[in-house]
Amino acid sequence: MNRKKVFVAGHNGMVGSAIVRQLANQNDIEIITRSRKQLDLTNQQAVLEFFRAEKIDQVYLAAAKVGGIIANNTYPADFIYENLMIECNIIHSAHIANIQKLLFLGSSCIYPKLAEQPMAESALLTGTLEETNEPYAIAKIAGIKLCESYNRQYGRDYRSVMPTNLYGPHDNFHPDNSHVIPALIRRFHEAKLNNDSEVTAWGSGKPMREFLYVDDMAAASIYVMNLQKNIYSENTEPMLSHINVGTGVDCSIQELVNTIARVVDFEGEIKFDTTKPDGAPRKLMDVSRLKSLGWEYTMSLEGGLTIAYQWFVDNQNRFRG
């Protein structure tokens, strides 16, 4: 049996590792990975030589430099440069090596700060981006446009998926540089261990946010990669080569906080510090396009949070400090 060679760039990250877990269940696939020490994705020559040597059939581009608001504000040059280099090197080298199928993973931050809710794919480039992560968002938009351009000029089948807020195993639980779910999981867990009487969450708790369990994201990525139908066939201008991935369902931050407290079994009081910023009042993805292509999420928020919390507990030694 000729097995398909599939390269997962970023296989140690949260999304990349979830894609690897799911691809490992398919007997007709040989998964190709490289650690950062083995292959520097910002090195054009190294990436091109890797693709020429390996004879890859499909590429999942899940590699990226990622971080929270603090990191994005502190290192904007690093975020735009490294992400642009990774995308340019992988997408161009895949083309040079005659790889026909590639899936690029973006981010919901590509959409304008004041985009109409829920955010449809057509909202791209219709307004000003959120200032705090603009360099990262511009790099991700460039990735979408790279894929579009190689499709238009060379007839490639390079697709892009834009996930909503993701969480799950292999998330970043750093105390100063993590997103809302891992930050809250860690805070409630440590409060429980310390027998703290209360936990304070930032903001009013009123903003609405959407969250997708990472294994659902991996399943959607594999589904979109292998769709036989032409996903570019809509009679729209410009061509919509990217697809939103999410649940299409949101909850308030207060609901999220209460759910995490329940999952962690924290029994103290929960307070909200309204002197801290709330951010955008709502960020929800329009996932009707993905539904029309035949895919929907399966994991409930509480179910996914339960798995994420257990993974954190089992891997606490990674997060000391």
Image (tube, helix red, strand yellow):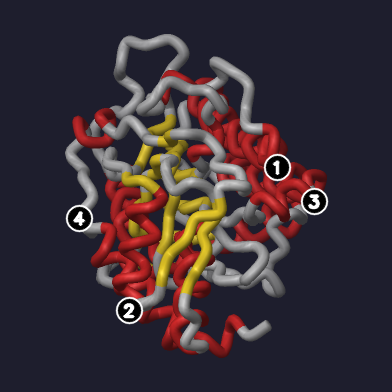
Mark 4 vs mark 2, foreground winner is: 2
Residue type, mark 3 in image: Tyr
Q: What is the quadrant of residue 54 in the picture?
A: bottom right
Element type where label 2 sits in the image: loop
Residue type, mark 4 in image: Thr
The answer to which of marks 1 and 4 sits earlier in the sequence is: 1
Residue type, mark 1 in image: Leu
Mark 3 vs mark 2, foreground winner is: 2
Element type where label 3 sits in the image: loop
The answer to which of marks 3 and 1 sits earlier in the sequence is: 3
- Real-space Cα distance between discs 4 and 2? 24 Å
Residue 242 in picture, x, y percent from top left: 43, 31
Q: Quadrant of the N terminus?
A: bottom left
Task: Give neighbour class at mark 3: few <14, some 14-19, many 20+ (Cα, 10 Å).
Answer: few
Residue 298: image tag: 4
Residue 221 in picture, x, y percent from top left: 36, 49
Say which residue label 1 marks.
84
- Real-space Cα distance between discs 1 and 4? 33 Å
Residue type, mark 2 in image: Asp
Task: Identify the residue at horizontal 34%, vertical 58% (top origin).
Answer: 213
Say which residue label 3 marks.
75
Say which residue label 2 marks.
265
The answer, for residue 143, to whether it is visible in the render is yes
Q: In this image, 145 relative to 227: left or right?
A: right
> Is residue 218 or residue 6 the one in the foreground?
218
Mark 2 vs mark 1, foreground winner is: 2
Q: In this image, 117 relative to 89: left or right?
A: left
Query: Are the residues at dot 4 and dot 2 in contact (C-beta closer than 8 Å)?
Result: no
Query: Are the residues at dot 1 and dot 4 in contact (C-beta closer than 8 Å)?
Result: no
- Real-space Cα distance between discs 3 and 1? 14 Å
